[in-house]
Image (cartoon, rainbow, N blue to C red):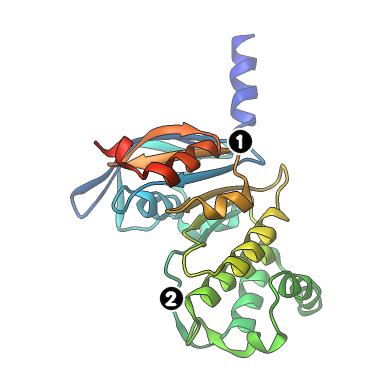
């Protein structure tokens, strides 16, 4: 009976992070992070600069610079640490970068088609059918696709291009690393609406942010405060309101 209960718990867990310690070039960044995400849940991770938020996103994506010194990451019952970044993407993992890179010579259209063909085996006709509603959801003109990927894009345009990829791929788990930075209120609402449109038992997300404004539109199921490499508080969106009122001093003393 006990074994059956344990199996049910595992099946109902999408991502399990257990006592995770991570270092970069010998410097310890994460110091015992534990987190459980179930299918369909949206989790927000907040914290001051240098708390380890982006480190968490990079280690989940499999960046080779980030060494897991202790702990384990399990995704859909699989040891995530044993998978390459490409394998993680194939398993339905997606990372929206805090600082999207410029790719001269590659148009946004070509890039989107390439990733959709690779991840979803989309034909040109299927790609076109998938693209149109995603473009409309973000208020993009079709000519935007002919620009070189992120070259000359404003900060807001880069973040919306990341969300466009998210809508096209429809991953199982997305990590949005400060997708709200550089966005005005109207763009913020548009992006939040697009992310909310994916909410289902087949989509979960970790939203990393400094500010609670985006959470008013996304309405996460859980909010976590990361400070000095540890999760020091967890709760609902009310926790984000506490940050808005008093900052992070309460958890960084």
Which residue carries the number 2 mark?
101
Q: Residues within 10 Å of mark 1 (few under 14, many from 20)?
A: many
In the displayed structure, 143 sits above or below 129; it is below
Query: Which of these two is toward me, 178 or 111?
Result: 178
Name the residue rendered at 48%, 37% in the picture.
239
Q: Are marks 2 and 1 in contact (CB under 8 Å)?
A: no
Q: As drawn, which residue projects farthest toward the left?
A: 26
Which residue carries the number 1 mark?
38
Percent across and percent down for residue 35 are: 46, 35
Percent across and percent down for residue 108 are: 59, 82
In the displayed structure, 215 sits above or below 36; it is below
Dividing the image into 4 quarters, which one contains the N terminus? top right
Judge left or right: residue 7 versus residue 198: left
* Quarter assignment of residue 112: bottom right
Q: As drawn, which residue projects farthest toward the top?
A: 1
Name the residue rendered at 46%, 59% in the picture.
178
Percent across and percent down for residue 200 are: 73, 45
Query: Which of these two is toward me, 244 or 30?
Result: 244
């Amino acid at each position: 009976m006990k074994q059956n209960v344990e199996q049910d718990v595992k099946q109902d867990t999408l991502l399990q992070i257990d006592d995770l310690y991570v270092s970069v070039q010998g410097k310890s960044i994460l110091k015992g992070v534990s987190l459980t995400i179930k299918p369909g849940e949206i989790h927000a991770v907040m914290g001051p600069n240098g708390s380890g938020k982006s480190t968490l996103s990079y280690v989940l994506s499999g960046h080779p610079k980030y060494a897991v010194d202790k702990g384990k990451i399990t995704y859909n019952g699989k040891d995530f640490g044993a998978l390459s970044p490409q394998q993680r993407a194939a398993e339905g993992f997606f990372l929206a970068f805090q600082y999207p890179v410029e790719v001269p010579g590659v148009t946004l259209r070509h890039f989107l088609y390439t990733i959709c063909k690779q991840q979803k085996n989309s034909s040109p006709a299927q790609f076109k059918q998938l693209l149109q509603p995603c473009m409309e959801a973000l208020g993009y003109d079709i000519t935007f696709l002919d620009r070189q990927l992120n070259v000359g894009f404003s900060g807001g345009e880069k973040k919306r291009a990341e969300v466009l990829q998210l809508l096209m791929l429809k991953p199982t788990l997305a990590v949005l690393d400060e997708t709200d930075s550089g966005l005005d209120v109207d763009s913020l609402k548009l992006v939040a609406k697009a992310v909310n449109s994916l909410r289902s038992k087949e989509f979960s997300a970790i939203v990393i942010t400094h500010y609670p404004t985006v959470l008013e539109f996304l309405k996460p199921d859980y909010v976590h405060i990361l400070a000095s490499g540890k999760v020091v508080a967890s709760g609902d969106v009310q926790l984000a309101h506490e940050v808005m009122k008093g900052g992070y001093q309460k958890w960084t003393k």
